[in-house]
Image (spheres, rainbow, N blue to C red):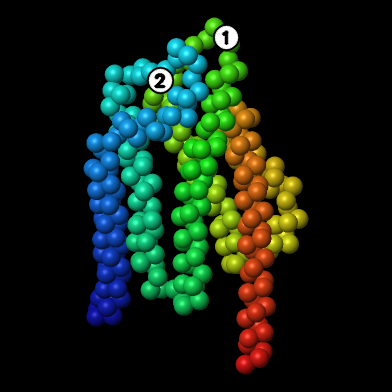
């Protein structure tokens, strides 16, 4: 009886700690949301700028639903709050699992954690500054001349958030590739041989998670392939690290 109680105590303590860290992350999201709420309309204007700058004369964004002028900026503000809270949320996750890691695992995990955050934000910025202007520049010029472009603000927001998420996750490819090689799941040589299939797979993924047009699919597939190549370069460092470790052990 006492053995069962002692074995359950650590589990309960871990669950309580996990709950507390989740609550802290939720609180941070809410605090950021409250702070940004008063700038919700300004934030929407910033996010919609890539389209508004390219709209033909006489065109504008419209709201086809009664609540859209209120809900669309609110939805965007919440999404930005979650986005900005990612470093703190990952820090809480790191603090929860770090005690169970060995010293060498911690040394690897910290750079990977930081690089994951930087790459995710890099993907979002790439989508905003490069992809959106190119996509909207293409969409607003290929339509029939007699058709006036009137984009719904809620549909526009859904479109943009989907691209932000897609490119943010896509930019994690180098980290994912490195982890696969580091864990011994695959090798750089094996991945290099499968490069043609990876290249084709990038376009398939681009087709599935981007709007149904070849333009945006290509804008996602090409960076995916380049990031895969970057991941291969990072994966080659794993072999060098192992060789250095073997040399040190032999010398000792």
Q: Secondary structure at mark 2?
A: loop
What's the residue at 63%, 30% (across, down)?
A: 214
What's the residue at 57%, 62% (across, down)?
A: 179
Residue 115 at least partly seen: yes
- Ranked by sequence position, the earlier of labels 1 and 2 is 2
Kindly give the residue lying farthest to the bottom in the view shown: 252
Q: Residues within 10 Å of mark 1 (few under 14, many from 20)?
A: few
Measured from the top left, where is residue 203 in percent x and y?
65, 39
Q: Is residue 130 above or below residue 86?
A: above
Measured from the top left, where is residue 137 in percent x and y?
56, 25
Which quarter of the image is occupied by the N terminus? Answer: bottom left
Which quarter of the image is occupied by the C terminus? Answer: bottom right
Q: Residues within 10 Å of mark 2 (few under 14, many from 20)?
A: some
Q: Is residue 67 left or right of residue 182?
A: left
Foreground: 192 or 73? 73
Q: Is residue 167 above or below residue 45?
A: below
Q: Which residue is mark 2?
A: 61
Mark seen at residue 108: none
Measured from the top left, where is residue 78 in percent x and y?
32, 40
Q: Secondary structure at mark 1?
A: loop
Q: Which residue is mark 1?
A: 145
């Amino acid at each position: 009886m006492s053995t069962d109680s002692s074995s359950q105590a650590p589990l309960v303590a871990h669950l309580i700690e996990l709950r507390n860290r989740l609550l802290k992350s939720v609180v941070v999201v809410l605090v950021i949301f409250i702070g940004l709420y008063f700038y919700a309309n300004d934030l929407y204007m910033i996010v919609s700028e890539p389209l508004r700058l390219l709209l033909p004369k006489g065109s504008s964004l419209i709201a086809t639903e009664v609540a859209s002028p209120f809900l669309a900026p609110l939805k965007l503000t919440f999404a930005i709050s979650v986005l900005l809270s990612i470093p703190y949320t990952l820090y809480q996750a790191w603090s929860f699992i770090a005690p169970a890691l060995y010293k060498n695992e911690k040394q690897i995990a910290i750079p990977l954690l930081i690089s994951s955050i930087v790459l995710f934000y890099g993907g979002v910025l790439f989508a905003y500054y490069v992809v959106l202007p190119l996509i909207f520049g293409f969409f607003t010029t290929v339509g029939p001349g007699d058709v006036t472009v009137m984009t719904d603000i809620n549909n526009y927001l859904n479109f943009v958030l989907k691209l932000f998420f897609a490119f943010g996750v896509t930019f994690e490819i180098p980290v994912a590739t490195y982890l696969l090689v580091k864990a011994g799941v695959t090798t750089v040589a094996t991945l290099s041989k499968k490069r043609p299939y990876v290249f084709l797979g990038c376009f398939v993924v681009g087709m599935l998670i981007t709007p149904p047009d070849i333009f945006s699919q290509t804008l996602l597939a090409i960076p995916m392939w380049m990031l895969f190549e970057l991941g291969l370069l990072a994966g080659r460092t794993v072999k060098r690290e192992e060789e250095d470790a073997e040399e040190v052990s032999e010398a000792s």
